[in-house]
Image (spheres, grey):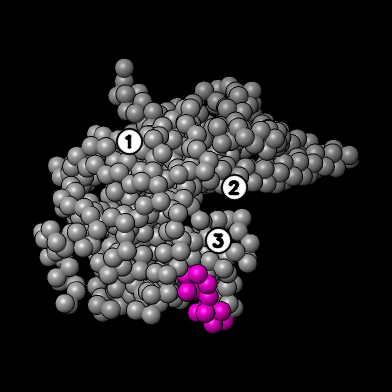
Amino acid sequence: MTEPETSSRPALRRLGSLGTLWPFVRRHRGLFSAWLVALAVSSTATLSLPPAVKQMIDHGFTGGGQINRAFALLLLVAIVMALATAARFFFVSLLGEKVVADLRGQLYAHLITLGAGFHDRNRSGELVSRLTADSELLRSVIGSTMSVALRSSVTVVGSLVMLFVTSPRLAAWSLLGIPLAVLPIILGARRLRAISRDSQDRIADANSLAAETLGAVRTVQAHAREPYEQGRFNHALKDAIGAARRRIRAQSLVTASAILLVFGAIVGVLWLGAHDVIAGRLSAGTLGQFVLYALIGGGSVGALAEVWNELQRASGGMGRISELLQEDVEIRAPSAPQALPAPLRGEIRFDDVVFHYPQRPDTAALDHFNLHVRHGETVALVGPSGAGKSTVLQLLLRFHDPRNGSISVDGLDLRQLDPAALRAELALVPQQPTLFAASARDNIRYGRLDATDAEVEEAARAAEADDFLRALPEGYDSELGERGARLSGGQQQRIAIARALLKDAPILLLDEATSALDAQSERAVQQALERLMAGRTTLVIAHRLATILKADRIVVMDHGRIIAQGTHQQLLAEGGLYADLAKLQFID
């Protein structure tokens, strides 16, 4: 086996990642077929051009009707070639747009189903880069590169056949240029793909840094770190440009080498052809036809060199996308999920649960944790930071599965349920609410998409959000900005509470739900929450003990275990951690 063959195999295998595009192309068979037809017509017209030129040279200057027929034939070929080329461009460009849109849609749908562990490990900016920058490379592959590759392949083969038909002797000599042109492509393929992958990674790093910094722009400005962040971003851009320079240099060398070798061979062959014309062994028209076929074939080989470069670059992007598409969904519904009872009572059990976060495999977030929450009971979880309180809610939402033990709702193990069906029965008010760059009405309606405007406004009134929402320039239809930037922290939290009120789920999860409210709003919202909690199972995480004095039971946690539980008065009488926390917050 020769060294070039050995070197080409890994490159071809890596290009196989582009084969995963075929299912997306196959969805649009009509466009694909129309493109192939247009491609066949345009390639045939291109290969028909040299004979038309031969007729013009040999017979177009003899006078009479010959000249009219020769030029009419040449014009007809040009018209067909122009129309077919335009049709080919239209069909393949539209095909590229649709395929990339389908690919982006499937990738996005897959990303939002991946578990919390995956999103904890990966930066959102890098994922967005793969969704945008990498898929843009594939748009170029389908909308342009694929068309050029197939067209060039057809014209190379067609030109080669016609070169032998025109002059077998000259064609045999011209074959020597083909291995010379292919050699630099094969030798440069491995390095080119590695450089292309590195270039895409550096672009993703810059995009991720920009997304992270812009998302925390207030923190940046509050610390007067604009010059520092600008320096970091410029450094990331410099790395990206450096990687791009290496990629472009490699592409340029491969392309230049291929074109130089091909056209050098063509010049040598034409030198032989000129001597044949002088010796009378070849007509001028035949040599002109051979020249055109040689130029068409040589240009197509050069185009294939550039196409190879682009395919290497795109295969790197598709490889990154394929890695995401192949990422396993950690939390998935069983093949035959059990149905939740209707209505759901909301009885919750944690039985000997052990859980470690993937980022901290040696530290148990919950350590043989046992908790039974009865139907309609309000249980408050308190304890120092890192005690495992938020982990209880995350496991109940089934963002993760425990390593050992089981979690059940109404006697049904969560792992036997469809996560979407389970989460539909849970209403969460997080400590740091997430608002979307949409209207206030749409942000509240996120709790229940089929809610009427009247129901949305009723939920806002119950959450003490109606007054400040009506004071906005467009009322409930006012855009809140990215992450609710137009609202204060307390106002954002009241929107999140209104969202949970609207959802009206049988199990309510409150993670410091009133932490960002002023004293007046807190009293009003606490009253609304108390009305909402009536008849519902509620788990409350609270650092401010004043908000949980009326809880049916207070569970004190530390290092992933329950160390005490009871009412406020019972826990004060027992002393210990809860009594210490109470002394810090209450003044006797």
Which amino acid lies under the numbered mark 1 shown in the image of this protein? Answer: Arg
The nearer-to-camera label among 1 and 2 is: 2
**Total numbered badges shown on the rendered structure:** 3
Q: Is residue 541 left or right of residue 139?
A: left
The nearer-to-camera label among 2 and 3 is: 3
| Residue 173 x, y percent position in the rendering | 49, 26
Q: Secondary structure at mark 1?
A: helix
Which amino acid lies under the numbered mark 2 shown in the image of this protein? Answer: Glu
Residue at numbered disc 2: 97
Residue 287 on the magenta segment: no
| Residue 402 x, y percent position in the rendering | 28, 38
What range of the chain is rendered magenta? 461-473
- Mark 2 packing: few (<14 Cα in 10 Å), some, or many (20+)? some
Q: Which residue is found at the position 52% from the left and 79% from the top? A: 467
Q: Which residue is found at the position 64% from the left and 46% from the top? A: 94
Residue at numbered disc 1: 190
CA–CA distance in space, label 1 to label 2: 29 Å
Whether residue 410 is visible to the viewer of this picture, yes or no, is: yes
- In the rendered image, the quadrant that contains the N terminus is top left
| Residue 72 x, y percent position in the rendering | 82, 42
CA–CA distance in space, label 2 to label 3: 33 Å
